Every structure is written in structure tokens, then in C-alpha cells.
Image (tube, helix red, strand yellow):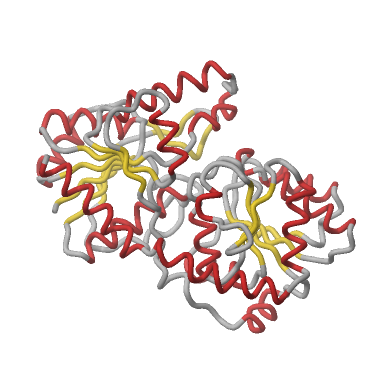
Amino acid sequence: MRIAIFTDTFLPQINGVVRSIVTTANQLVERGHSVAVFTMDVSKLANGHATSDLDARIPVHPFPSVALPGFGHIQARVPSLVGPLNAVRRFQADVIHLHTIFTMGVEAVWIAKLLKCPLVGSHHGFLAEYLNNFGLDFALVKDLTRRYLAFYYNRCTAVITPAEALKQELLGHKMRRPVHVVSNPISLKCFSGSASKPELTRRFGMTRPTAVHVGRLVRQKSVDVLLEAFSHLRQNGVDAHLLVIGDGQDRSRLEALSHALGLTDHVVWTGILTGQDLVDHIAVADVFASASTTEVQPLVFLEAMALGLPVVGANAGGVPEIVRQGGNGLIVEPGNPRALAEGIGTLLLDAGRRERMGEYARESVRTYDAERVVEDIERVYTSVISS
């Protein structure tokens, strides 16, 4: 098959959507398909990183865009058919797969209609929960956003989402197209090996039991709740490190909060890491922890589990769909620092339980391997093409 992928965010940007797209595209090419990516011109972004993760056989077509005022990390462009339409026509796509509801997604809808090409849409997140970034955190606006999402994805031939909770949100707002729950893919071969734990401990100087968090430093990730939980751990006599991997517009505020809570010597801020450096920094930890309530199917949970770490997460969004209580991790009450501290502390202080749960985590994540997941995506492509 010839698959045209449309996305507003792509390499050199680093986030969950980009990583999912890259892993899927690489695996599709390995399986003999032709893939091309159509996206914004994000190469000028200040927080960009190397693009070597993408298979060299995948062409990328960037179209002119500008940074949104006040949001330098977000690119936008006025929808225009000329460039993308000609590029897709030359590529001769059998199916178009959009990963956005914004500009590139709108163009994908138009192009699919004009070329009479099947259109698959991936719905990645609880977007209504991010409205407070724009001062629009109101019940009515959230409801209208969810209704619009269903209206938008009804333009597609079929829809893919990584969590049952997100599927139900769409169906609850008059979604009529088929919705397939297909996991985010993880390349287990990239997250299945690292240096030995003692070697990593010496290299990074992690002399205390260590919890790790990976993600963008924005309000929706609730890193402040995680820091408060660590403060409770310290007050209860648990001497531990917290490794925070990632960056974002909230970093300075969170670092100030860490200092105010007396955690300066216990929290390590690494910034954005990629490749083997990311793998090693996760593998040095004993537990993965997150307080986020807006996750759909977070890749960072799966990556930590692939490295043998039990996880602790909030009972919200799609987290309960991948974390099996007492098996591969613990689920705690959302927004409750004390409950989160208890969950993290339980695992940090019990090496035997932590090891057993880590082994179970490593086994349970096999179902999310890219090879299996891309087979499911292929079946969706085949169904929309044949119909």
C-alpha cells in the first residue's frame, strides 16, 4: 500500500504523537509499504532535535508555516490545497492517514474528498482538557469541543484511537464512523536493553532509590502533584531521588516549586533526552511515576514497563487500561499527592515486590510491540480501501 500521513507536529519536534507516527511509519516501510509524511515546516523550531529516528526511505514534505503568537512551540499555516494536493497526487496514495484536527488535518480531509481516497483519522488525546492553555477552561466550551471532534472525525472513512475511554467520548457525541481501538506502538527492541543497573547508578550518581517521570513540563501533566508527593515521601523519612525527563513552558515554575518544597537536592532535571540516553536514564530508576490525568495511552508508561519498571499512575483517562493494579503497577486517586506518595513509597521500599512487578510489566508490554500493532493498522487500511 501507499500511505500518506498528515500531521501538524513532526520531527524535529519530540512528543508522543511524533514518536507514535515515526514508529508506525518505520514499521510500515519494513513490511513493504510506501509511506510519505506531509507536515508543517517545523525545522526552524528552537526545541528541535535530530531526525535520524526516521527511516531514510520515508520522504517528508514540509509546507510553509509560522509560529503561533505566544506559542513558539506550535506551528500554524493557512489551509491551502495547491502544494499538498499536488504532492499527494504525485505520491499516488492508496490511503490518507491524518493525525491532527488542525490545518494539515483539514487539508487531508479536502484532498481525500477531491481524490476520492480513503481517509483514516487517528484521535490521540482528550483535547478538551487542554483548553485552559488558551483561557477557555469552561464546561460549555469543552462540550462544544467534544462535539466538534465527533463532527470532524465523521469526515473520515474510519477512526483509530489508542484507548477505549477516548472511543467512548467520541461515541457519546454523535460519532457515526467505525472507531477502532488500536494501541500506540512501541519498538521493544529499542526499549529492551541497557547497561547494567550498577553501572548506570555509578554513571548518573543515583545513590538513592529513584523514581523517574518522563513527559512535557506543562500543567496538564500535573508534575506539581508529583513534586508534592515527593515532599510527603521526604517528610515520612523516605530518602529518594526523582528524575524528571523532559522540558516545557512550565519548567521554571516547577523548579521553583521543587526548591520551595525543599527538594533541590533530591530532584534531577535532565531536559529532553532521546535515543539510548533516554533509555539509560529510565533504566537507572526503580519506579516510573506520573500524576497526569489527561493521558490516553502514554508511551512513556509502556517504555518504562519494557525496561522492567513498575509504574504508578492516576486512575484517569486511559491509564487504567494499561496499568493492572498490583500486577505491572499501582493506580492511585487522581490529584492526591499523599496517595501518589504512598504508591511510590510502597515500591521504593520493597525491592522484592518491585522486582516481581517489574518482571510482570516487562511481559505485559509485549502486546504493544510495533510489529503486532502495525498489523492491526494494516487491517484498518485494508478495510477502508476495499470499502
Where 315 sits versus 345, above or below?
Answer: above
What is the number of callouts on the image?
0
Q: Nearer the viewer, residue 96 or 311?
A: 311
Farthest residue in the top direction? 140
Q: Position of residue 298 (x, y in %)?
A: 50, 51
Where 94 sits versus 24, above or below?
Answer: above
Quarter containing the C terminus? top left
Q: Quadrant of residue 78?
A: top left
Q: Residue at x 24, y 57 (%)?
A: 58
Q: Quadrant of residue 160?
A: top left
Where 79 sits versus 308, above or below?
Answer: above
Q: Is residue 153 left or right of residue 187?
A: left
Where 245 sits versus 141, above or below?
Answer: below
Q: Residue at x 56, y 40 (%)?
A: 294
Q: Residue at x 32, y 56 (%)?
A: 24
Q: Nearer the viewer, residue 17 or 311?
A: 311
Q: Position of residue 100 (x, y in %)?
A: 36, 37
Q: Position of residue 25 (x, y in %)?
A: 28, 56
